[in-house]
Image: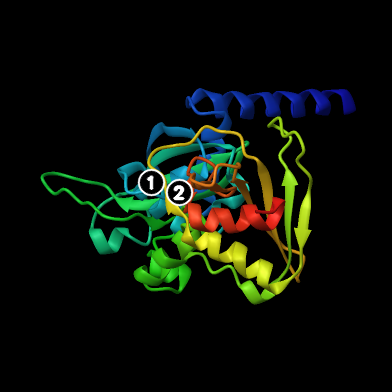
């Protein structure tokens, strides 16, 4: 009897497995559909894999259509995108009914489920375009809430907060470097450049801190991307033990500008005017 019962259980499990595969859905898409059913939304049809990409910070800001869509999508998630940067994200589409937006739009709803590493990480919802009516706009959260309802912010407040966190860093002259909180300025000879006679250098003198802040905030943006090796690693070390990091190149030619690179955006370079660069040259190696 025990053996027969075991056989019946195995057959039952096999039948369930076959039934799950017979409808043509498996893997991540099946996981996404199960997630939808867990919300008690009725799946009308499947749209399959709509999009697949590796999430980067660059995809979360900018003026392009893709960046705008990514911002709006991630803006209505319950989890921030930080944990998924550098990871592959898949988007599976479904048409559903019994959704909170159905009564508002009198149509079925497209629900897009976001997945990463085999797990559901969120999703969006939006009314299906039917007939001659074309609906455009920002997506809702999975359960039909607006960005304002999800975040508790106005759209303008959310954009400002988003850009502070995910947008490109401010130019050096626009950065609040909190001069009074800097405990130490440190220059380290950059290992990637032959630097005969170079020596590491540091100072905690307030007047020196001020001189470096002046040089940084006088720097003007250079056109295009840069491809060069720095002379020094420049570290502004704060009293709370955090560090703001740059690459800085001064050279010895007093007629030449210095060059600064913020390590939060290494593709962009800034020119330190020769007058300010000379003050740093005199400070570090003498006039």
Structural distance between the alpha carbons of marks 1 and 2: 5 Å
Closer to us: 27 or 258 = 258
Name the residue that disc number 1 marks: 67
Mark 1 element type: helix
Q: Residue at x 38, y 52 (%)?
A: 125
Q: Which residue is drawn at 26% across and 47% down?
A: 128
- The quarter of the displayed image where residue 34 is located: top right
What is the x, y in percent for residue 15?
A: 63, 25
Q: Give the left or right position of residue 136, taking residue 27 as reference.
A: left
Q: Is residue 245 visible?
A: no
Mark 2 element type: helix
- The quarter of the displayed image where residue 102 is located: bottom left
Query: CB atoms at circles 1 and 2 under 8 Å apart?
Result: yes
Q: Is residue 64 above or below residue 99?
A: above
- The quarter of the displayed image where residue 87 is located: top right
Badge 2: how crowded within 10 Å, few (<14), some, or many (20+)?
many
What is the x, y in percent for residue 209?
A: 66, 67
Name the residue that disc number 2 marks: 60
What is the x, y in percent for residue 25?
A: 50, 28
What is the x, y in percent for residue 136?
A: 22, 51
Q: Is residue 3 visible?
A: yes
Closer to us: 99 or 5 = 99
Q: Which of marks 1 and 2 is nearer the N terminus?
A: 2
Q: Which residue is drawn at 37% across and 73% down?
A: 154
């Amino acid at each position: 009897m025990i053996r027969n019962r075991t056989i019946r259980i195995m057959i039952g499990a096999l039948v369930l497995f076959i039934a799950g595969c017979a409808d043509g859905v498996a893997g991540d898409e099946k996981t996404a559909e199960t997630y939808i059913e867990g919300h008690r939304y009725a799946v009308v049809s499947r749209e399959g894999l709509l999009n697949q990409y590796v999430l980067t910070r660059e995809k979360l800001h900018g003026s392009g259509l893709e960046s705008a869509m990514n911002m709006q999508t991630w803006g209505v998630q319950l989890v921030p995108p930080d944990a998924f940067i550098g990871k592959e994200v898949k988007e599976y589409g479904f048409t559903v009914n019994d959704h909170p937006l159905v009564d508002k739009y009198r149509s079925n709803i497209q629900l897009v489920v976001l997945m990463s590493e085999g797990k559901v990480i969120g999703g969006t919802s939006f009314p299906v375009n039917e007939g001659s009516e074309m609906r455009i706009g920002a997506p809702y959260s999975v359960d039909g809430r607006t960005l304002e309802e999800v975040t508790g912010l106005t759209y303008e407040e959310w954009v400002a907060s988003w850009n502070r966190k995910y947008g490109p860093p401010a130019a050096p002259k626009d950065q609040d470097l909190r001069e009074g909180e800097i405990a130490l300025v440190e220059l380290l000879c950059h290992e990637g450049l032959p630097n005969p006679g170079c020596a590491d250098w540091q100072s905690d003198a307030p007047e020196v801190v001020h001189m470096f802040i002046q040089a940084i905030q006088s720097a003007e943006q250079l056109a295009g991307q840069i491809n060069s090796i720095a002379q020094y690693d420049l570290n502004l070390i704060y009293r709370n033990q955090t560090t703001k990091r740059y690459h800085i190149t001064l050279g010895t030619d007093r007629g030449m500008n210095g060059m600064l690179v913020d390590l939060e955006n290494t593709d962009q370079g800034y020119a330190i005017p020769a007058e300010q660069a000379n003050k740093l040259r005199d400070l570090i190696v003498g006039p």
